[in-house]
Amino acid sequence: MENSKNKNLLFFTAPHNAVNRKNKASLNIEKTTAVPDFHQNETATQATSRRPLEPCPDIPPNLQGVLRVEFRTNRTLEDVRQHVGPLLQQGGRYKPANCVAKQKVAIIIPFRNRYEHLNHWLHYLHPILIRQQLDYGVYVINQEGDGVFNRAKLMNIGHNEALKEYDYECFVFSDIDLVPLNDRNLYRCSDKPRHLSVAVDKFNFLLPYNTIFGGVTALSREQFLKVNGFSNTFWGWGGEDDDLYRRIFFRGMSISRPDSIIGRYKMIKHGRDVHNDPNPHNVQKLEETYYNIDRDGLSSLSYAVMEIRKDLCHTFITVDVQAPAG
């Protein structure tokens, strides 16, 4: 379980709703600390006449391009609320006021005990997503307890729980430690499953290997259902994103990527998480993907929702994933 210091972050000063239940089931540099530009634009828009809205443009007009991202600061969740809160609805929801968004997007973040990273992610990503004119919600799926971590299962759960709230068409699955360095990298889905985090600073902005499909990815609802989601059986670190790539291949699809300038990311430096050690069995499991697609994934997903908390910046869902002991 998270320590008491971390728990305190869940008692929000902004209005929130809590639910307890158990169910199975070459470009301008932008300093994102300077927010007034997008605040003023949206406020002015809301004052316009109530005429029928046109679709948002394919290329959002207020994108900044290259961004400056800095993690060396003591950033709190309340700081983030003050930074972006006036434009958000409860639960980390937003939609543009002056046009109809191209897609309804759920951002799914697998999570455990990374509260400092979450504050950085929310601080940078909300302004980016707002400028991208998305109709979106942010869902943080928190694994309860200290059992072995299961990133893939948490993302399956996030998909299901988000659909209970809204008819999302696109799902962006994002690690909590990755922040884009260019807001022209659109968090939208396309006709192919899309790998967004193609050039990460940790890897010297190079693609580690050609079939990598981890970090930040986007799949439409239809694409995700076609591959039966992620496997639920990759406990510990490694393998689940390679398994997803194979599922995509075996279902007759291919992936797309932005170029290595648009698709740049900065990773928050951190040590290996407790109870998320590399699992040597996961390598062997990759040989079984073809045979397991239909029986292991969304179709076999089992979990219990322990608590749902609605903060201004995100929806925080704590779940029991029925993990083996750490």
Image: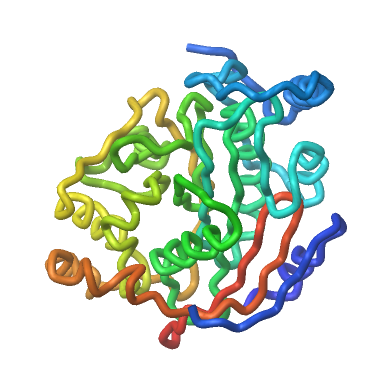
Q: Tell me if 145 is positioned left or right of 154 in this view.
A: right
Vertical position of residue 131 compared to residue 80: above or below: above
Q: Is residue 204 visible?
A: no
- Up/down of 255 relative to 48, above or below: below
* Residue 68 rendering spot, x and y as whole percentages: 60, 27
Image coordinates of residue 101 in percent, x first then y, are: 57, 32
Asked whether, in this view, residue 5 is left or right of residue 209, the answer is: right
Residue drawn at point x = 20 percent, y = 44 percent: 253
Instruction: Give the camera-side residue of 36 and 251.
Output: 251
Which residue in the rendered view is the most extreme toward the bottom?
325
Q: How is the image coloured?
A: rainbow
Foreground residue among 164 and 210: 164
Front-most of residues 37 and 292: 292
Residue 143, position in %: x, y?
A: 54, 72
Q: Where is the C terminus found, in terms of image quarters? A: bottom left
Say above or below: 14 vs 279: above
**On the picture, is 235 further left or further right than 140?**
left
Tell whether 156 sits left or right of 224: right
Residue at image position (65%, 37%) is 95
**Of residues 322 and 99, which is closer to you in this image?**
99
Based on the displayed image, in which of its 4 quarters is residue 188 positioned? top left
Residue in the image at 50% along x and 82% along y: 24
